[in-house]
Image (cartoon, rainbow, N blue to C red):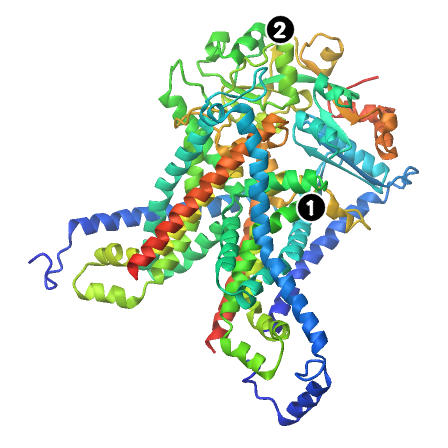
Amino acid sequence: MLLTKRIPMKVMQEKGRNMRNSTISIVGSRKTKRISETIAHHIFTICAFFAVLGVASITVYMIINGTPALAKVGILELLFGSDWSPTAANPRYGILYVIFTSIIGTTLAILIGVPVGVLSAVFLADVAPKKLVAVVKPAVELLAGIPSVIYGLLGIMILNPLMYRLELALFKGSATHQFTGGSNLISAVLVLAVMILPTVINISESSLRAVPDQLKAASLAVGASKIQTIFKVQIPAAKSGIITAVVLGVGRAIGEAMAISLVAGSSVNFPLPFNSVRFLTTAIVSEMGYAADTHREVLFTIGLVLFGFIMMINTILTKLLKKGNRNDD
Amino acid sequence: MTDLSIMKKNKRITDQLIYMIIYISAAISVLLIAGIICYVFMKGINTVNWEFLTNVTSVLKDTSGIAGNIVNTLYIIVITLLIATPIGIGSAIYLNEYAKPGKLVRLIEFTTETLAGIPSIIFGLFGMVFFGIALGFGYSILTGSLTLTLMILPLITRNTQEALKTVPESYRSGALGLGTTKWYMIRTILLPSAMPGIITGIILAVGRIVGESAALLFTAGSGYYLPKSGQLFGKVLESGGTLSVQLYLNMSKGQYEIAFGIATVLLIIVLIINFMTRLLTRKFDVSRKK
Amino acid sequence: MKKNITRMLMLCMIPVLALGLAACKNNSSVDSPSQSSSSALSGKITMAGSTSMEKLSNSLVEAFMEENSSVTVTAEFTGSSAGVESLLADSVDVGNASRNLKDSETGAGAVENIVAIDGVAVVVNPDNPIEDLTKDQLISIYKGEIADWSEVGGLNEPIVVVGREAGSGTRGAFEELLEIEDECQYALELDSTGTVVAKVASTAGAIGYISLDMVDETVKAVKLDGVEASAEKIKAGDYFLSRPFVMATKGEISEQNELVQAMFEYIYSDAGKELVESVGLIAVD
């Protein structure tokens, strides 16, 4: 823009005179230029390494604080023990059930949320009339941005009472079931599924829309029906975007702590649908404030496990993405 | 062969079924989304009035309001942006303009992506133990801001990078050809041209900050009093609960009317942020097309 | 284009500034009557700890800040054990605990300063017809041996056993007084007194234990062995579930800085005792 603006001749001459006198001349004051240049260069390099520093310090901190517990309590007892009683006279730190809960809970949330999300994205991108899209799309974007605690609030107000009624009906007269008043695995899974819906819908919809019209037109021209076009041509073409959406959804689901801490219960149990359960994240939240010594180290180990899971999922899914892209080329 | 002839548009049963599934999924999503927004507004709009927004919750005076929380949220937004924006922009400038593609750049980009994927609770854990205890800031807005800086750094870096990439190469070579130095070119030509994209990134970061609660609960604490006159800067070292944190606390204590009031306020804030982002992206795109 | 952005940013700042001014006006109109003589003190006091002590802490903080307008007191509610730990780690000036301090804590330098006596009330959902429980019935319920309200004379509905998290002072006091440490079978371990109130109030068949000063109309406090939970009964020694509210300091009060000393002076003064009674607790002499 600077070079194409029409500048009157007088101003140009003025500018030329000024340029000759100021320090940005290409012939004079090279030294001050050089110093400010190198300073700027160094500052930017330092800035860039902040990200590396950040990740490095978090990883190092987690490892330093998380591994002593592994040694003290023993990897087998810690990761594969099912008895979690950190404040008993003889403390036990088995987080097996907690790990199971996170895995099962997140998987269920994804299984529910992703298909509904992707199909809704298909609806918005291809099937819905324009007016409906104009109303629904901003609503989806709004929901993608609200704090996750609001989902937790709705879970408590609406889901928990419903779940309690279901629980009472299903387990009437049961001698072995411990009643939880509606805070259980299913409530948490449903809250997570609803939470990842807006993210999945948003990104899937943009990638579906980004598929070139020629592809769709060509498919319809050779006689495929609209549904065939969507599922055999459009979705594969938007695959990388949809996988990104799934990755982000998984990340959000596995990392969510506040929204589900009040709907999931908080006792450590095997993750059956109607049991009060604890996730890796809620385990950290509920005890972070007061854990001491070994207890705190175990919390860091939980954080480390969580960290490990996320890195694993990210790497696997990114590799899938890269492989997919390479196949398309 | 006859089924697939383009002359005979056979309405296949599977197609109909799939259409139905799509409509059902979409209906579920739309009803959920509309339901959530309406429910929150309906339950909260009665609580939100001028007193709610300008009073502080007080046991002795028997008032309740979120003025303290609003001020805390503003403090956290401002301080986090003050720290994170220069670092994020500097980072993006380095990656785009100075660095040569290779292992180093890939390492930095990989770590930035990783940082973006770490769940907020781990940031909270790290922030509490590192900034709060090890560095001794305790429960304070400063601790919260430093923790949040780590969280939104990838956001700002990525958005600035995208913005810088859209500046045409001719601007850079033109400036360098005229004899300017790199830093001069960056600060007078690149940054102003990329500014809308950068601002979009900042606004998105603000949205993220407002919605964050897990990372702040144990770093910035839950204080809700207004700063006393003359203590505007000292407030940074005191504990301050933001709107999201206060929402969580009210929710866990069963004070649902206040909780829904805060939820409504947050919804309105997100609406405004979305609106501003959309406005800026449209301006950004239109000017590029020129 | 840059001008438009600047204009928009300016527009956004106006409502923010307006809010700030209005809030400040509210605040200052509240501050002006308190031109007391002890406003020579200035500085910061930090407290952390028990959620049961939230009402007392907040009232104390407000009253103290009104008397001393240049002092800021903040209180975090993280749980009794967390509060004492923060105290010992030098992160806060005062650690609030709703139980007596453990030997490990006093051994590390924490000094127990009892500021009030509180009762632990056992509450049930208001729709529950039960009025009275014996000590043994309570123990059996929390150990999981009795699972249905019909077994103690109530309706035919399952008992939802609600308790606090492991570091809670209320839980520590409750389990210690009933001598059932490590034997409780909780359906839910919630992390603050307020959460327990909310859960019991909204779940038929729930039972929980909370601080006496948090009992409100949304829950029903049951009598234990025929004795109702009230301040008088606790003072008379009839209600057996009572525990101290401790504001621990690292070292004696006389060793603290003058702000903390002033605060403790206030608590132990007549005005402080009045405050304690006004929130439903029992003052110590």
Mark 1 Cα shell of 10 Å, populated few (<14), some (14-19), many (≥20): many
The chain ID associated with circle 2 is C
Front one among A202 and C29: A202
Secondary structure at badge 2 equals: loop
The tag on residue B48 is none
Mark 2 Cα shell of 10 Å, populated few (<14), some (14-19), many (≥20): some
Which residue occupies 73% across, 22% down? C280
From this viewpoint, is residue B226 visible? no
The quarter of the rendered structure image containing the C terminus of chain A is bottom left
The tag on residue B141 is 1
The chain ID associated with circle 1 is B
- Residue B176: quarter of image: bottom right
The quarter of the rendered structure image containing the N terminus of chain A is bottom right
Front one among B236 and B71: B236
Q: Position of residue A130 (x, y in %)?
A: 35, 62
Residue, disc 2: C225
- Three-letter residue code for mark 1: Ile
